[in-house]
Image (spheres, rainbow, N blue to C red):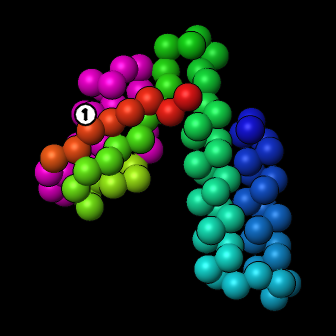
Amino acid sequence: MDRISALRNVEDALADFEAGDASLEDVEDRVLGVLRTYATDFESEDGDRAAYLATGDPGVEGVVVVAASAAAARERVAERADAPGEFRVERLD
């Protein structure tokens, strides 16, 4: 999914919410699905970056970051969490 498609899907979800055709929970699920799909399909133009998913302690569980390596992804996840605890990252392909 490219960025334009992702934005259109988010816009559609918001329009449905505004029209009363979707609940907040439905919209949250749809937007999260768009984001996850975009992240897992993500490829940088130079091929040097990829999306990584963090799993482990609740403070980082499910966090997705884009980085050039697993080590860089771990750093980015740790920066985003107050207390990251124990976690690992895996590349989303």
Q: Position of residue 59 (x, y in %)?
A: 26, 59
- Taking the image as shown, residue 83 lies to the left or right of residue 71, namely left
Q: Is residue 46 magenta?
A: no
The count of marks equals: 1
- Taking the image as shown, residue 91 lies to the left or right of residue 5, namely left
**Vertical relation: 68 (above or below) 24:** above
Residue range (magenta): 64-85
- Residue occupying the point 58% across, 37% down: 40
Q: Position of residue 81 (x, y in %)?
A: 25, 53
One can see residue 81 in this view? no
- Residue occupying the point 76% across, 68% down: 13
Location of mark 1 (residue): 75
Using the image as rendered, state which of residue 37 and residue 24 is in the foreground. 37
Q: Position of residue 65 (x, y in %)?
A: 43, 39
Name the quarter where the N terminus is drawn.
Answer: top right
Q: Position of residue 91 (x, y in %)?
A: 44, 29
**Vertical relation: 21 (above or below) 48:** below
Using the image as rendered, state which of residue 11 and residue 84 is in the foreground. 84
Which amino acid type is shown beneath numbered disc 1? Glu
- Residue occupying the point 83% across, 84% down: 21
Using the image as rendered, state which of residue 2 and residue 70 is in the foreground. 70
Q: Quadrant of residue 24?
A: bottom right
At mark 1, the secondary structure is helix
